[in-house]
Amino acid sequence: MFCRASLLAKSSVRNVSSGGFRRLASTKSLKETLQEVIPPKQEQLKRLKAEHSQDVVGEVKVENILGGMRGLKAMLWEASVLDPIEGIRFHGLSIPDCQKVLPPAPGGKEMTAESMLWLLLTGQVPSPEQSHQLSAELAEKGELPTFVEQLIDSLPQTLHPMTQLGMGVAALNHDSVFQLAYERGIKKSEYWTYALEDCLNLVAKLPALAARIYRNVYHPERSIEPIDKNLDLVGNYSRMLGFGQNEHLTEYLRLYIALHGDHEGGNASAHTAHLVGSTLSDPYISYSAALFALAGPLHGLANQEVLRWQMAMQKEIGDNITHENIKEYLWKTLKSGQVVPGYGHGVLRNPDPRFVALQEFCKTRPDLQASPIIQLVQQTAEIAPDVLKEHGKTKNPYPNVDATSGCVLYHYGLTEFKYYTVIFGVSRALGALTQLVWARALGLPLERPKSYSMDALEKLIKN
């Protein structure tokens, strides 16, 4: 772990993954930084294998096997750890820590996707110069190949945006440097360098791909702004979506994408990227598979379900919004056999720190405080936990990040519900792709868990 006071006192680049802090030259590139931090991690893995391979860190219960492997300690993921009580930490840093130390975009206040990407990859907080240098590199790589533009433009408007995003990402593997190098024949020790190049290329191109899908599906009459080499990744994404003049939305997207960048490796999309990547599929193929996992209703569609539910509540209650009316609507939802969307989490047992961060964002902006839908979200968050506790069927009765994330997008004019998961897909790439680099750097093997039939499981239990 780390010393929070020491962390917040230092203003230069920090090494937070090894438990200590050391100043680093702020001019080092991302690849140069990784070349420094990878060997110690390789040695740590080697030591763990040699000295602790037979140590027991958990036990497998029948409920783990029958319950989707939930809670099973069976995966290595370096970027983040999700604690049920504290929430997510990125290389030991909490969300408030990240908000204090990760560099914002020039003129902005919220941490950038680039600074979060640097942290997830290296375990270090980048200097503003390093973060801006990475922004410039991604902007240079950000244009889509013509054949991908033609592919996306040929798809019907009625095809779900997430399907289009997955197809576009898979098609980009045409230019995979990892695949080309592997076919040529390279040392295993070099895998990570080519995976890194693919991952940075993909992160760079996701905003242009996602914006083109948005334009084609919802606003075919619009042109798409070219990439501005002076803007950060999210600044360009907002601009290409057509919201470049809305600095409030751009700042919100910066926070949203950074917060959603990683949430440890066990969630469906991150795990899918890791699983497919373990076959040595290139990062494009691996992340396209992750996107199709993210598209499922039990994973990435939650924030739009929250928004629909809150708007239905708003329509039924009308202007007479009281705690009692909200409570009655909550019970009506539960008694109808439905769940309250945006509440509960597979791991967390406290309010989601990402929800707290987004609520703090709302509190600093008068326009959001005056928004009826945001007011309703805040009041619901005050009432719902007690109702869910009384109901007694929810392990975690507190709000998760989805309880508010889509509602803010809607307030700022991005009102197309089906598109919300695409934004999630742009953000989740930060964590899933960085861990593909580490999986190749550490030489992690093909993932192959053992499965049982019910008959075999019953026999195992009897024995």
Image (cartoon, helix red, strand yellow):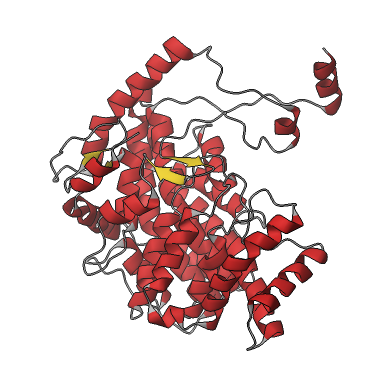
Measured along the vertical axis of the image, is residue 316 above or below residue 271? Answer: below
- Name the image quarter holding the C terminus: top right
Where, by quadrant of the figure, is residue 254 drawn? Answer: bottom left
- Name the image quarter holding the N terminus: top left
Measured along the vertical axis of the image, is residue 157 above or below residue 287? Answer: below
Say which residue appears at 55% left-offset and 38% top-offset: 276
Asked whether, in this view, residue 254 is left or right of residue 308, the answer is left
Q: Is residue 417 visible?
A: yes
Question: Which residue is nearer to you in this view: 293 or 313?
Answer: 313
| Count of marks overlaid on the render | 0
Q: In the image as oriented, which residue stretches furthest toward the bottom?
A: 319
Give the image location of residue 291, x and y in percent: 55, 52
Where, by quadrant of the figure, is residue 240 drawn? Answer: bottom left
Q: Is residue 164 visible?
A: no
Say which residue appears at 47% left-offset and 13% top-offset: 52
Give the image location of residue 6, x and y in percent: 22, 41
Asked whether, in this view, residue 454 is left or right of residue 303, the answer is right
Give the image location of residue 181, x and y in percent: 37, 34
Question: Which residue is nearer to you in this view: 428 or 441?
Answer: 428
Asked whether, in this view, residue 114 is left or right of residue 71, the answer is left
Measured along the vertical axis of the image, is residue 32 above or below residue 377? Answer: above
Where, by quadrant of the figure, is residue 143 drawn? Answer: bottom left
Question: Which residue is nearer to you in this view: 37 or 57?
Answer: 57
Say which residue appears at 49% left-offset and 73% top-offset: 409
Give the image location of residue 43, x and y in percent: 33, 19
Say which residue appears at 36% left-offset and 53% top-offset: 96
